[in-house]
């Protein structure tokens, strides 16, 4: 089968959502269908929150986060010096988010929690795709979504340890791509399996389709790294209840733990290091721009992971490794 045809088929759902969204006024009131299922109120709001879900009975993302707010957060992404001009837009974000709103993305809790989650997710995205620096025009936090791929990869990110489960495709390069950049063959493989897109053989699809790039990032946000551990979503909105060991490891529900889940000890447990503070600063900046205010981000131990022990510690480097 021609791989491009196969890819097109796999993306049918995403592209269908995009087509629907482009023909509807996404600021208009959606058609609401309500049904009681086992005593619980379930709702379906059409294209944005489709399929009966308790979360679709709440506000949906377009109710509180609209195009002008997206533009405010990412004001510099299409300037001539940016590296992904014309790639990222609000429509792609909403089309991808719509697939996860029935699962609670941006639809859990009341309006304040919903807005905080979108700001938190986009705070990670902005910090990982920025080309801002200290004296950049508009400030260093205005340059999120400047990239959609790693510009000068130092390697192909092919790990032969996974040659039986996620074998590297001939000629494929598994460098960082996307809104929450994906690295390594095994991560492209597992993400592709979840999204039903052949990313193992075609990792370049992530840098060619902004909706798919956002979809992959939201899937990562909504999905635990390992069984028995929380997803970033669950840790942020409070669905996750820390164990005694979590409490001893200073892991609490909130933004700090989302960094622990996504980045582990590359960012966390090292005190107030720049790599962590940059992510936190993007989140706080977006809270301000969205009208929520950074004071809603919580105290230091909730906002950061400075003192947290990682869920998944990095393997120690072998003494024999050169």
Image (cartoon, rainbow, N blue to C red):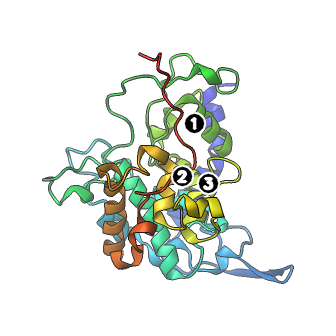
Disc nearest the viewer among 2 and 1: 2
In the image, 153 versus 204, the foreground residue is 153
Question: Total number of numbered labels?
Answer: 3
206 left or right, relative to 141:
right
Q: Specify the quadrant of the image occupied by residue 299.
A: bottom left
68 left or right, relative to 38:
left
CA gap, disc 1 to disc 3?
26 Å
Q: Give the residue number, with chain letter if any, for mark 3.
A: 16
Looking at the image, can residue 98 be seen? no
Residue at disc 3, secondary structure: helix
Q: Give the quadrant of the C terminus.
A: top left
Q: How many residues crowd around disc 1 within 10 Å: few (fewer than 14), some, or many (20 or more)?
A: some
Residue at disc 2, secondary structure: helix
Q: Give the residue number, with chain letter if any, for mark 2.
A: 261
Looking at the image, can residue 189 be seen? yes
Q: Give the quadrant of the N terminus.
A: top right
Image height check: is 109 above or below 120? below
Disc nearest the viewer among 1 and 3: 1
Identify the mark nearer the N-term, 2 or 3: 3
- The disc label shown at residue 187, or none: 1
Residue at disc 1, secondary structure: helix
Disc nearest the viewer among 2 and 3: 2
Spot occupied by residue 15 in the image (x, y as percentages of width and height): 58, 50
Which residue is pictured at 36% across the width and 24% down the height?
A: 154
Spot occupied by residue 210 in the image (x, y as percentages of width and height): 46, 48
Q: Specify the quadrant of the image occupied by residue 284.
A: bottom left
**Circle 2/circle 3 CB separation < 8 Å:** no
Q: How many residues crowd around disc 3 within 10 Å: few (fewer than 14), some, or many (20 or more)?
A: few
């Amino acid at each position: 089968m021609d791989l491009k045809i196969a890819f097109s088929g796999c993306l049918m759902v995403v592209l269908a959502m995009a087509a629907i969204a482009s023909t509807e006024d996404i600021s208009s009131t959606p058609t609401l269908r309500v049904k009681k299922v086992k005593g619980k109120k379930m709702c379906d709001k059409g294209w944005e929150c489709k399929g009966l879900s308790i979360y679709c009975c709440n506000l949906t993302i377009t109710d509180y986060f609209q195009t002008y707010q997206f533009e405010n957060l990412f004001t510099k992404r299409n300037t001539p010096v940016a590296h992904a001009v014309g790639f990222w837009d609000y429509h792609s974000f909403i089309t991808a988010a719509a697939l996860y709103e029935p699962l609670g993305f941006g639809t859990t809790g009341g309006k304040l929690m919903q807005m905080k989650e979108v700001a938190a997710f986009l705070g990670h995205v902005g910090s990982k795709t920025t080309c801002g620096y200290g004296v950049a025009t508009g400030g260093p936090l205005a340059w999120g979504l400047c990239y959609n791929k790693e510009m000068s990869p130092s390697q192909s990110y092919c790990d032969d340890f996974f040659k039986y489960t996620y074998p590297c495709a001939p000629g494929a390069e598994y460098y960082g791509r996307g809104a929450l950049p994906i690295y390594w063959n095994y991560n492209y493989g597992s993400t592709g399996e979840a999204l039903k897109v052949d990313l193992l053989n075609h990792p370049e699809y992530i840098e060619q389709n902004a909706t798919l790039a956002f979809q992959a990032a939201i899937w990562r946000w909504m999905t635990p790294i390992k069984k028995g551990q929380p997803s970033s979503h669950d840790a942020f909105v409070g669905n996750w209840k820390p164990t005694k060991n979590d409490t001893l490891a200073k892991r609490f529900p909130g933004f700090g733990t989302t960094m622990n889940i996504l980045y582990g000890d590359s960012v966390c447990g090292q005190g107030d290091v720049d790599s962590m503070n940059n992510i936190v600063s993007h989140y706080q900046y977006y809270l301000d721009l969205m009208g929520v205010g950074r004071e809603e981000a919580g105290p230091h131990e909730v906002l950061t992971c400075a003192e947290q022990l990682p869920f998944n510690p990095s393997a120690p480097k072998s003494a024999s490794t050169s």
